[in-house]
Image (tube, rainbow, N blue to C red):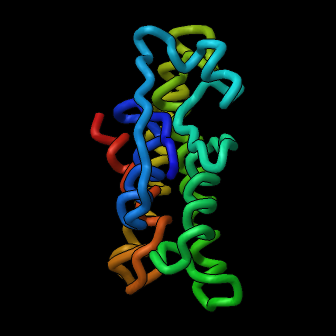
Amino acid sequence: MYKLYWNPGSANMAPHAALEEIGAAYELAGLDFDRNEHKGAEYLRLNPNGRVPTLIHDGKAIYESAAILLYLCERHPDAKLMPLPGSPERGHFLQWLVFCTNTVQEEMMHWWHADNYMDSESGRAELKLIAERRLAGMYGQICKTLANPGPFLLGQTFSAADIFLVMLCRWTRQ
């Protein structure tokens, strides 16, 4: 049994969707951000970064959305959400998942949380404009891949990288 700590609209969406795809038994543990439950001592013992998601399995905590995805994919290879080591698609899977988490998600953090990077309002506004411009290029690259060979990041093969991408696309709605 897995336990996934979550909050609506956060980076738990990808691991949550993967748990559904896998069909594994899990329980959700909601965190109320308005009450700062993710910054409380109990949760910080699980995830010292105070962010979601955190997955509990066999009494151990795993955090970072992409790491949780990889963990779930490795534990449930029959779900076929990740090409197996040695597979010709493995490198592209890793490339897209890391691109989504290290490049696209990081740039989205600049847009959503410019206050974490810049002190002045003008600096935050400039950072958001730069992030929008950079994200447009990144999403253009993704769209080209989805169009050809598509329809997924790995061509005809659906994977956890697509799940992660859907989560990021949801975040672009504003």
Depicted 45 relative to depicted 61: above or below: above
Q: Is residue 135 above or below residue 155?
A: above
Residue 97 seen:
yes
Q: Residue at x 46, y 28 (%)?
A: 112
Expressed as whole percent of the image width and height from the top left, the position of residue 14 reads: 44, 52
Looking at the figure, which quarter contains the C terminus? top left
| Vertical relation: 69 (above or below) 59 | below
Q: Residue at x 35, y 32 (%)?
A: 8
Q: Residue at x 57, y 81 (%)?
A: 83
Which residue is at the front of the view, 5 or 155? 5
Whole-percent x, y for residue 154 in the image: 47, 79
Q: Quadrant of residue 25?
A: bottom left
Q: Point out residue 46 in the picture as x, y percentages from the top left corner.
A: 67, 30
Which of the 4 image quarters holds residue 35?
A: top left
The answer to which of 126 and 11 lies nearer the viewer is 11
Residue 170 location in percent, x, y? 32, 45
* Nearer to us in this view, 141 or 106: 106
Determine the residue positioned at 41% across, 28% down.
30
